[in-house]
Image: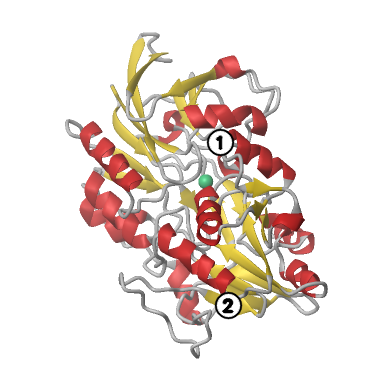
């Protein structure tokens, strides 16, 4: 595809049409209320949430895509001036409200861009998405799959969100006298909170802006901003920290729960730093939250329970809105692309999905080194740093040109102090607030 035709989750440079997979901040860097570069294609739910994220946005620029339906987009070939043929279908990405993948086809071939996605096979909704994708692909071969490779490493083993949600309910039930705080983002993990509310028949506290989002999403009665009505509070992830939970415990017994697919560990930073929760390579030192001596808990479905208590007041539960390694594999086997690229890159822990799954593609499997595992072998710790690569089909598809990347410090659940963020900035990483690592 020629450069300058379309961009997906990329807002720098110029294209004729822009596509937004979902509204998490790491996919909207460069997008603002004053956007005027061109039309933005997104799902109906993303469009509904748009004014809340970007007040004053010119909504006439939004083009709604009905999920599961092919839409034609008229473009002009920049080099020849002739019309360019493009069709696009949005498919539910099961990630956060409004999140979709985009399947493109046209003169350039067939491209599938997952955005962030979770490919569970255990829910009815997932089955619908699977059927939709299979039907859409019946006459096409995906030439390039742009893949959410956040957890494209065999060490990322976690259960379905339904199971993880129940693990969180179990933790809450086992602490009947405690207040509970759960770290969440500005969008996403609503189903988890609904599960907790229904299972325990309680309301969930959220902060005022989050309550507005909940109302936009149609949840009128479950959430509240009155702390007196519930002992379970969903708090902004940036405010969730060891210090916060310890401070709350000086007033009332409180348990913090961080739903995250990332493995966590508490480790000291440099001398004088406080304890710091971080992405770590190892998932093999898990302890069972009920205190069975540190053994892993095998669930009946074969998934590891993998709840860990990494601080006396804080539990990490692998509730993830991204696909685990096995699910990524299942997805690739289903799509069988000719080639694929990861949309999340990182100098510290990026693994080219071709390394593990190239055998399912027409492409050769690269003999790529695995910095992630090498560090583990050397006993080094991997920092909670990921680079989120934004994407422009016009700029990158069909070419080996290195894509522009935005480096994000993934706010890996535990609060990253300004001090540590600044320290990293001096190391050369661009720090941006991240909305969506888990
Ligand atoms: Zn996301």
Q: How many marks?
A: 2
Label 2 or label 1, whichever lies nearer to me, is: 1
Q: Which residue is found at the position 67% from the left and 42% from the top?
A: 211
Q: Which residue is mark 1?
A: 218
Q: Does residue 38 sit above or below 175 in this rendering? A: above
182 to the left or right of 3: right
Disc 2 crowd, CA 10 A, few/some/many (<14, 14-19, 20+): many
Residue at (35, 55) in percent of width and height: 353
Say which label, 2 or 1, has the lower sequence index.
Answer: 1
Reply above or below: 31 against 273.
above
The kind of secondary structure element at disc 1 is: loop
Q: Are marks 2 and 1 in contact (CB under 8 Å)?
A: no
User: Which residue is more in the foreground, 236 or 364?
Assistant: 236
Residue 147 versus residue 80: which sits nearer the camera? 147
The residue at label 2 has a CB less than 8 Å from ligand 1: no
Alpha-carbon distance for marks 2 and 1?
Answer: 34 Å
Where is residue 363 drawn, in percent x and y? Answer: 24, 48
x then y, percent, for residue 258: 59, 64
Q: Is residue 210 above or below residue 38?
A: below
Q: Can residue 366 be seen here?
A: no
Single out the residue that lies furthest toward the left.
Answer: 139
Question: Outermost residue, top direction?
Answer: 82
- Quarter of the image where one finds residue 31: top right
Mark 1: give few (<14), some (14-19) or many (20+) Cα within 10 Å.
few
Percent position (x, y) of residue 138?
A: 18, 34
- The residue tagged 2 is 309
Q: Picture coordinates of residue 320 (x, y %)?
A: 48, 57
340 sits to left or right of 409: left
Instruction: Kindly identify the residue that appears in the image at 24 percent across and 39 percent down.
Output: 131
Q: Secondary structure at mark 2?
A: strand
Specify whether 61 is left or right of 6.
right
């Amino acid at each position: 595809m020629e450069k300058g035709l379309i961009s997906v989750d990329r807002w720098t440079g110029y294209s004729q049409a822009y596509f937004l997979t979902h509204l998490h901040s790491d996919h909207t860097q460069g997008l603002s209320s004053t956007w005027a570069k061109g039309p933005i294609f997104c799902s109906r739910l993303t469009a509904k949430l748009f004014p809340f994220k970007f007040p004053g946005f010119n909504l006439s620029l939004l083009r709604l895509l009905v999920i599961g339906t092919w839409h034609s987009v008229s473009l002009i070939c920049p080099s020849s001036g002739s019309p360019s043929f493009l069709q696009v279908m949005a498919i539910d990405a099961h990630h956060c409200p409004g999140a979709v993948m985009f399947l493109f086809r046209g003169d350039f071939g067939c491209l599938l861009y997952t955005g962030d996605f979770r490919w569970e096979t255990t829910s009815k909704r997932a089955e619908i998405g699977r059927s939709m994708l299979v039907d859409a692909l019946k006459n096409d071969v995906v030439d390039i799959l742009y893949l959410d490779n956040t957890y494209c490493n065999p060490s990322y083993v976690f259960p379905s969100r339904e199971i993880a949600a129940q693990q969180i309910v179990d933790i809450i039930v086992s602490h009947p006298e405690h207040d509970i705080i759960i770290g969440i983002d500005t969008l996403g993990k609503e189903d988890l909170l609904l599960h907790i509310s229904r299972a325990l028949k309680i309301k969930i506290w959220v902060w005022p802006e989050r309550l507005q989002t909940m109302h936009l999403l149609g949840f009128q009665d479950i959430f509240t901003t009155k702390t007196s009505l519930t002992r379970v509070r969903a708090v902004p992830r940036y405010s969730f920290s060891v210090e916060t939970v310890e401070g709350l415990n000086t007033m009332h017994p409180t348990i913090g729960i961080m739903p995250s697919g990332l493995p966590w560990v508490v480790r000291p930073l440099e001398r004088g730093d406080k304890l710091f929760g971080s992405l770590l390579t190892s998932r093999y030192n898990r302890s069972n939250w009920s205190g069975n001596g540190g053994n892993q808990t095998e669930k009946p479905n074969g998934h590891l329970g993998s709840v860990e208590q990494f601080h006396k007041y804080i539990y990490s539960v692998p509730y993830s809105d991204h696909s685990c390694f096995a699910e990524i594999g299942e997805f690739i086997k289903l799509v069988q692309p000719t080639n694929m690229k990861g949309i999340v890159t990182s100098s510290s822990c990026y693994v080219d999905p071709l390394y593990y799954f190239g055998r399912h593609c027409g492409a050769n499997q690269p003999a790529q080194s695995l910095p992630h595992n090498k560090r583990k072998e050397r006993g080094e710790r991997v920092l909670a740093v990921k680079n989120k690569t934004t994407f422009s089909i016009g700029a990158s598809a069909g070419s080996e040109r290195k894509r522009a990347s935005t480096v994000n410090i993934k706010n890996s659940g535990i609060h990253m102090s300004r001090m540590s963020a600044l320290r990293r900035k001096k190391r050369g990483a661009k720090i941006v607030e991240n909305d969506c690592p888990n």
